[in-house]
Amino acid sequence: MTNIRHILVSNDDGIEAHGLHVLEEALSLIPGFRVTVVAPSDQQSASSHALTLTAPLRILDAGENRYAVTGTPTDSVLVAMEKILKEDPPDIVMSGINHGPNMGEDVIYSGTVAAAMEGTMCGLPSYALSLAKWHPTDFSGAADFLVEHLSSILEFPLRKATLMNINLPDGPIENFKGIRVTNLGSRVYQNVITDQVDPHGRPYFWIGGSGPLWQRDAGTDYCACEEGFVSLTPLMVDLTHYGLQQEMKTMEMDFD
């Protein structure tokens, strides 16, 4: 009998996001999976790994095997693991498909990546998926790619405390050129904070910007997606810089 793997699906765009529905449908077409969705009840982009500590969390019924949590992506995965699926734990966590890229330094801000990282911290193989276009219009290629290739991607064993960050091109599968294993790129945002004035003439600020300028370094997630490839970037929870740690050993001392 085929081993059915239970997948917990979450995101940061909210329970009704189109990318989430695309991921659900793609998984339903792949034999051997069953899915439970536990996602934020509303938009939580750029929430990073925030936990809600100053307000109550509520679980809302969003359909068969679908639940909305009134909190962040991290809240959603944690509530799923500790409450909703405590007696029926998942085997894998998948977060996405995000409406926009999660590449380079943006993985630090990303709620999509944070949901997958929370899955990793719970001891599960975890994957963050994003459509690598700022205003995505066509998820069809991403869906077709997942149906055709996700099973083989899942066969690669992730090490403890690691996760996989996947960025997929916008557009039909015919435009996809292949898969590249990448490292994080680097970007600089322009005009990140804009000055605005409300109807009463009072100034305020809005964080947004006009989009980043990317360094075109070979082997990065940005370059792979820009050239039409699916980018697979392994990430890890441990942020220790081990090389620098060893260099800093000369700073150690004992106080008498």
Image (cartoon, helix red, strand yellow):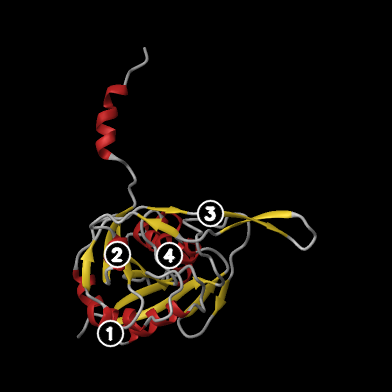
Crowding at dot 2, Cα within 10 Å, few <14 / some 14-19 / many 20+, comes out as many
Q: Is residue 165 left or right of residue 87?
A: left
The three-letter amino acid code for the residue at tag 4 is Thr
Q: Nearer the viewer, residue 138 or 162?
A: 138
Crowding at dot 4, Cα within 10 Å, few <14 / some 14-19 / many 20+, comes out as many
Looking at marks 4 and 2 on the same chain, the residue that comes earlier in the sequence is marked by: 4
Circle 1 sits on which residue?
A: 30
Circle 4 sits on which residue?
A: 112
Where is the N terminus found, in terms of image quarters?
Answer: bottom left
Dot 4 falls on a residue whose secondary structure is: helix
Circle 3 sits on which residue?
A: 192
Looking at marks 4 and 3 on the same chain, the residue that comes earlier in the sequence is marked by: 4
The three-letter amino acid code for the residue at tag 1 is Ile
| Residue at figure coordinates x 40%, y 70% from the top left | 133
Dot 1 falls on a residue whose secondary structure is: loop
Residue 62 in view, yes or no: yes
Q: CA distance from mark 4 to mark 2?
A: 15 Å
